[in-house]
Amino acid sequence: FWNVENLYDTLNDPKKLDEEFLPEGTNAWTGQRYWTKINHMAKVIAEMASDATPEGLSILGLCEIENKNCLDDLVKDPQLKARNYQTVLVDGPDARGVDPGLIYNPKHFKVLKVVTYRIVLPYDSAHKTRDQLVVSGSFFGEPLTIIVNHWPSRSGGELKSRPGRIVAAQMSRRIADSVVKLDPKNKVIIMGDLNDDPPNESIKKHLNTYGKLKDAEEGKYFNPMEPLYNQGIGTLAWQDTWNLFDQTILNKPLLPNGYKTFEYYKAFVFNKPYVKSDFGNFKGYPFRTFSGGAYTAGYSDHFAVYILLLKEKVK
């Protein structure tokens, strides 16, 4: 999963608050800047997990995407084109016009169903936040459902905004439970920028997670990002404090099973030197596209995360 920090095209959509990201807008979002960002994103995606498998990522959830055309431009980049990635994005109600999306390798994952679910904030029902994107299909012949999230932000303060993330967590868990009820063998991954860390109430209590495989319980979800967070590893930083908002959370059918089916092996934060800022007060932070209102030609204000799944090869 990767929050890519505002992937907008350069065209005005009258239904969206995209004026900042126009050539004449405050961000001077020209074609050159757009294609530079596409190129940078493609470099990261091409490299993620390529040390584990030459075909790289099978599935990648993303957020802060303006529309499907942006994803289509991304997967056509020369660094990715040979993989023939396909794209999924459903326009939602978010006022800024950014949505979660998915790219996938059709040789590995066959998409069977795409639906979205709306979130209503308990403290501001008029505020339009991002939908949850649910993509179900067959991963190398095994049933898999991905729930791609971008939960309500901490704008106005963590405490004041917390109920919105709790509502989002409850929605994700209801979706996951309904999928598993139809097929107990269905593998489910809840992924996204959750705007909360692994120990926070929305995740720990309402998704009902644990961080150690030995603590596995029926009805609970495994959060492989929790041990990384406990080691001080993060995906975004603010005032010298690291957060790990970007997570992939797994249900029981994805846990170690003797490699009879695909199982969880390891989680990673993609934080190689070139995606880090190397100067000033933000040295070591994610190398952003914009910093303090100035264009810096970076990658994103979040690091990407990914997990490896393994299965014993049948001879």
Image (cartoon, rainbow, N blue to C red):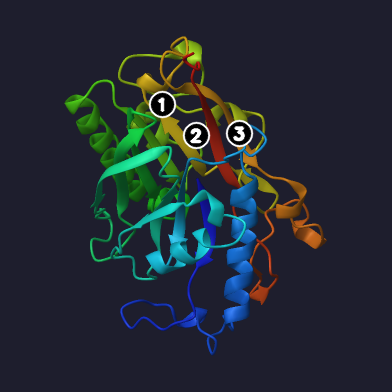
- What is the quadrant of residue 121 in the picture? bottom left
Please say if 185 is above or below 72: above
Say if mark 2 contacts mark 3, CB within 8 Å: no
Nearer the observer, 124 or 35: 35
Residue 135 at least partly seen: yes
Please say if 278 is above or below 58: below
Residue 262 image position (x, y, % from top left): 44, 22
Q: Tell me the kind of residue under disc 2.
A: Pro
Say if mark 1 contacts mark 2, CB within 8 Å: yes
Q: Which mark is residue 209?
A: 1
Q: Tell me the kind of residue under disc 3.
A: Thr
Which numbered mark, 2 or 3, is in the foreground of this view? 3
Disc 2/disc 3 C-alpha distance (Å): 28 Å
Which numbered mark, 3 or 1, is in the foreground of this view? 3
Residue, disc 2: 198
Disc 1/disc 2 C-alpha distance (Å): 8 Å
Residue, disc 3: 53
Disc 2 is placed on an element classified as loop
Residue 301 at least partly seen: no
Q: Earlier in the sequence, mark 3 or mark 1?
A: 3
Q: Residues within 10 Å of mark 3 (few under 14, many from 20)?
A: few
Q: Tell me the kind of residue under disc 1.
A: Thr
Residue drawn where x is 44% and y is 82% of the image: 11
The outermost residue toward the left is: 182
Residue 254 image position (x, y, % from top left): 41, 22
Residue drawn where x is 50% and y is 66% of the image: 7
Q: Earlier in the sequence, mark 1 or mark 2?
A: 2
